Image: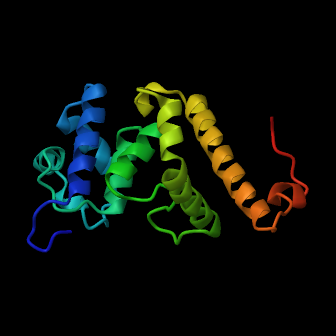
Amino acid sequence: MATDGTPELAAKRCGEAVARLRTQRRWSRAQLVIRLYSELSPDDPSYESISETWLARLENGRMVKVPRPTVEALCRALRCTPQERARVLLYADRNVLVESDAEPTPEAEALTYVMDRLYAEARDLLASLLGSCQSVALDELEMLEATAAALDAVIARHRRREALCGHPRQPLAAAAGLRVAE
């Protein structure tokens, strides 16, 4: 949050994503607010401030910060698909792998690291695989396949690097006796 009270870019992007989803569903702000009330606990600190005016401020980028539980409640109120939820959380600068009321798990930490490496090392490959398609135009299987191909390329690059250094090793899945699905 900016110390001068100006909206965070993440809050602005989150509001734009929420507005887009609400509009796609042809819901009024009042309809979304009613749904949001049913998703938030009356004990939630944001509960009393939720209104059509609050939602308009969020959608128009005039919100300073949106708490994670409120973003999650908005996703539930919007009946977001997993892909839509991931996008809203990304735009809100929240990690999709962590629940609002829990500590990150070792699996979430591992996946966060892998996503960071994948983005850093295979961004160009992913861009070429996706072409000019927006991610919303791809179905779940297409996104998984593109990501798997990019991850395979990163793994191959790391294996070559290890082999050149004289440190080849058996893949972890094979060492654990796991069979990778084809």
**Residue at figure coordinates x 81%, y 60% from the top left:** 172
- Along the viewing direction, whichever of 54 and 86 lies nearer the viewer: 86
Question: 71 and 46: which one is in front?
Answer: 71
Please state the horizontal and vertical placement of residue 5, each as a whole percent of the image.
10, 68
* Lateral position of residue 130 relative to residue 10, left or right: right
Q: Residue furthest right?
A: 177
Closer to us: 11 or 132 = 132
Q: Residue at coordinates 54% horizontally, 69% vertically from top-left? A: 104
Rendered-image quadrant of the N terminus: bottom left
Q: Is residue 159 visible?
A: yes
* Of 177 and 151, the residue lying toward us: 151
**Residue 176 in view, yes or no:** no
Relative side of 43 to 62, left or right: right
Image quadrant for the C terminus?
top right
The structure residue drawn at horizontal position 38% and vertical position 51%, both measured from the top left corner, is 90
- Which corner quadrant of the image does residue 16 belong to? top left
